[in-house]
Amino acid sequence: MADKPLVMITGASAGIGQETARVFSQAGHPLLLIARRPERIEAMGLPDTLAVGADVRDYDALVAAVEEGERKFGSVDCLINNAGISRLARLDEQDPKEWRDLVDINCLGVLNGMHAVSSGMKARRRGTIISVSSIAGRKVYPHHDVYGGTKHFVHAISEGLRQTMSAHGVRVMVISPGVTKSEIDKTITHQNAYDFWNKGREAMDGGIDANDVARTMLFAYQLPQTVNLQEMTITHTRQEF
């Protein structure tokens, strides 16, 4: 068993999640990595890693993954709620079917992850939950109507849980990246929304590197358990809005 505690990351097969796995692995942590494409996790070849093919919308699957990971590596000390999709569009132009995916993955998926680990952390009186939101969870952008709403939800539910867990010594944090070099653009299916988003991306050389987002989360996690960096917003210096 590794010397450092177990870190669980959802959406770990690409983008910010994949880079976060690399960063925390380099820091010596065993990993419980969740994704619908576990073969991509296994291809990374990280040591002390359990890759589980699961969908964050499936609460029972997440609970089973936590149980399996903890049998192998000990208790989950940090959850990074990273899984998410970016179905950008104006509400009146968007297929209502896309709302379901946004809400189920970006909202219910975050809740499922939180609930799967929070009781154990509460009992141990330590732990850290970091949820990956977006700058769109703090500001309102064109073509971000429902997506932005789901990210505002992440902030609201995280603050509620933070207040609940504070008396038990458990930290709850939110990180809100701006435009980031990742695979999130592949989930933008509406052309007008993509054109708007891509114009901003090109103005800042593609945005910030996912590694910088990952290292920011590692920094926050490595602070003493008595220090909670509740809110983190990280953007390219040239991101104007």
Image (cartoon, rainbow, N blue to C red):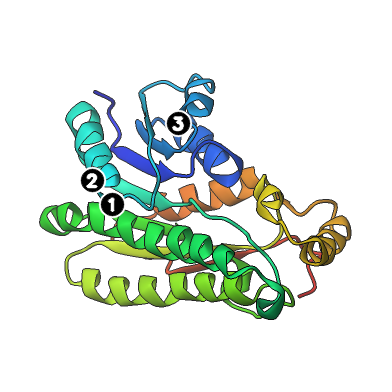
Q: How crowded is mark 3: few (under 14 residues within 10 Å), some or many (20 or more)?
A: some
Q: Which residue does the numbered mark 1 point to in the structure image?
A: 59
Q: How crowded is mark 1: few (under 14 residues within 10 Å), some or many (20 or more)?
A: some
Give the secondary structure at mark 2.
Answer: helix
Q: Are marks 1 and 2 in contact (CB under 8 Å)?
A: yes
Q: Which residue does the numbered mark 2 point to in the structure image?
A: 63
Type of residue at label 1? Tyr
Kindly tell me whether residue 80 is visible in this rendering.
yes
Q: Which of marks 3 and 1 is in front?
A: 1
- Residue drawn at (35%, 30%) of the image: 30
Q: Which residue does the numbered mark 3 point to in the structure image?
A: 25
- Residue drawn at (22%, 26%) of the image: 72
Asked if residue 240 lies left or right of residue 39, the reply is right
The location of residue 36, given as percent across then percent down, is 46, 37
Looking at the picture, tell me which residue is in the foreground, 26 or 52. Answer: 52
Quadrant that contains the C terminus: bottom right
Mark-to-mark CA distance, 3 and 1 = 25 Å
Looking at the picture, tell me which residue is in the foreground, 19 or 196. Answer: 196
Asked if residue 138 lies left or right of residue 207, the reply is left
The location of residue 14, given as percent across then percent down, is 58, 38
Give the secondary structure at mark 3.
Answer: helix
Q: Is residue 232 above or below residue 21?
A: below
Query: Splitting the image into 4 quarters, where does residue 125 fall?
Result: bottom left
Q: Disc 3 or 1, which lies upstream in sequence? A: 3
Asked if residue 72 lies left or right of residue 105, the reply is left
Type of residue at label 3? Ser
Q: Is residue 238 above or below residue 205?
A: below
Query: Splitting the image into 4 quarters, where does residue 1 fall?
Result: top left
Mark-to-mark CA distance, 3 and 2 = 22 Å
Q: Nearer the viewer, mark 1 or mark 2?
A: 1
